[in-house]
Image (tube, rainbow, N blue to C red):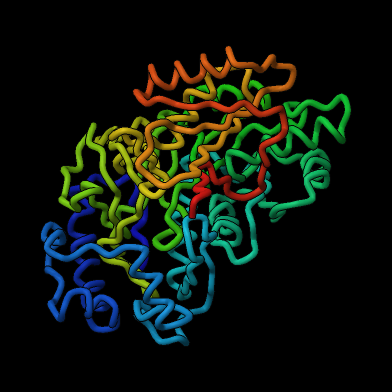
Amino acid sequence: MSTLKDADRRPAAELHPHIEDAWQRQRAHVAANSPFYRSLWQGRMPPGTLRDLPDLPLSDKAQLRLSQAEHPPFGDYLAAPRSVANRLHRTSGTTGQAMNLALSARDTQITQEVGGRCHSAAGLGPDDTVVHCLNYQMWMGGLTDHLTLEATGALVVPFGVGSTELLVRTIQEVGVTAISCTPSYPAVLERVIAEKFPGLAPRDLGLRLGLFGGEPGLDDPAFRARLRETWGMEPRNANYGVSDVFSNFAAECPHDTHLHFMAADLLYPELIDPDTGAPLPFEAGESGELVLTHLVRDCQPLVRFRTGDIIRVTATGPCRCGRTGFRFAVVGRSDDMVVVRGLNMFPTMVAAVINEFPELSGEYRIQLDTPPPHDTLPVIAECAEGAAAGPALAQRIEAAIKAKLGASARVTLQPPGSLPRTEGKTRRVIRGYQ
């Protein structure tokens, strides 16, 4: 048993018997083969129906890190013989210790199929040539996402990171129509084009589609508009995932910029209060932390796993594209949240304000030099080329943050090009006191 054909287009009533049956198999597998969960559950058998899943305790990344430290390399939540694992990935380590991820042949095939659903929904197809610019060095986003791009029927160019001049020439010579990368990477490309290719504008490369993931930013309409204007391509959030769970299980479609949940046959989602862990209703308008349970996973099955992502459910009915999964927006990560006088601030919220100012490049950092509590939000913002920086601009930005977010901010302006661009994930919150 693996994926269910057209699961992303089937109504909930039709999916229900399938996912309950999948859970029966999966709960038996986890209970019999995962020492980690047997210990967490104190010998209890997990409930027989998914509606009773909240009776089980939550699991989280800190527990998995401890498990791998005590039982290297895969932790005692490895629920299959070592011989069953046929691929090893490693998380990026953006939010802490990098994790070793083991996948069986079935795990990798399922991951590829689900990711293919996502990239297809975002508009990639057999007529496209897509260049994949994520790190292939063990990170899930490299090889695995390459295979999900192939699942759409597209011609995939396995470029990876670095050699940006060669990338520009490759796009020109091969006739690339789409690019797969992080939202911050186009800024790197723009700088190289300006320095090394006089007279060439980004839109001259002829890209029609940008498939983005790996970091936030694309939810901001101003950022999207800037990409469209500069590149002449349609930006799509096409690659939302949680490496410990699935490389890619949500994407937007041409009709809705919110993410569509594409893995209802393989993942059971819950919403909880991030502070108390109490279940929240899965309905439009509700916000909370996303919790996921594998319904089919051989090597490292997770049950009631806290993703750390705070999401807002935007719709639960079918989309015009025909897909039936719930739709959502990612508000931010719980470990990136900064509390300023009781107000929860996420980098995406700051970015939305920053991008309203044409005098700024869009690059910013939240620089925390002291531990909480925080009375003000310290923001470093980079000026755009030719912009006149000064105290008046900083005061205007501070006033906008106060008006839109409710928090007092202290804005420091930096010259153009002073904040580093990265080909991988960009860390926006810098905790200098750690």
Q: Is residue 77 left or right of residue 158?
A: left
Residue in front for this viewpoint, 269 or 146: 269
Point out residue 304 in the picture as x, y percentages from the top left corner: 25, 61
Residue 428 x, y percent position in the rendering: 53, 41
Which residue is at the front of the view, 128 or 407?
407
Q: Is residue 1 visible?
A: no
The quarter holding residue 349 reads top left
Who's the residue at 64% across and 32% down the image? Answer: 208
- Report the number of discs: 0
Residue 138, quarter of the rendered image: bottom right
Q: Split into 4 quadrants, where in the image is the N terminus?
A: bottom left
Q: Looking at the image, which residue is at 34% across and 38% down?
A: 339
Q: Is residue 11 above or below residue 29?
A: above
Which residue corresponds to the image point at 39% horizontal and 61% vertical from the top-left?
245
Give the image location of residue 275, x and y in percent.
23, 48
Q: Does 53 sit above or below residue 289?
A: below
Please tell me which residue lies in front, 433 or 37.
433
Q: Is residue 59 visible?
A: yes
Picture coordinates of residue 270, whole percent (x, y):
23, 51
Residue at screen point 42% across, 76% down: 68
Q: Which is more toward the observer, 32 or 15?
A: 32
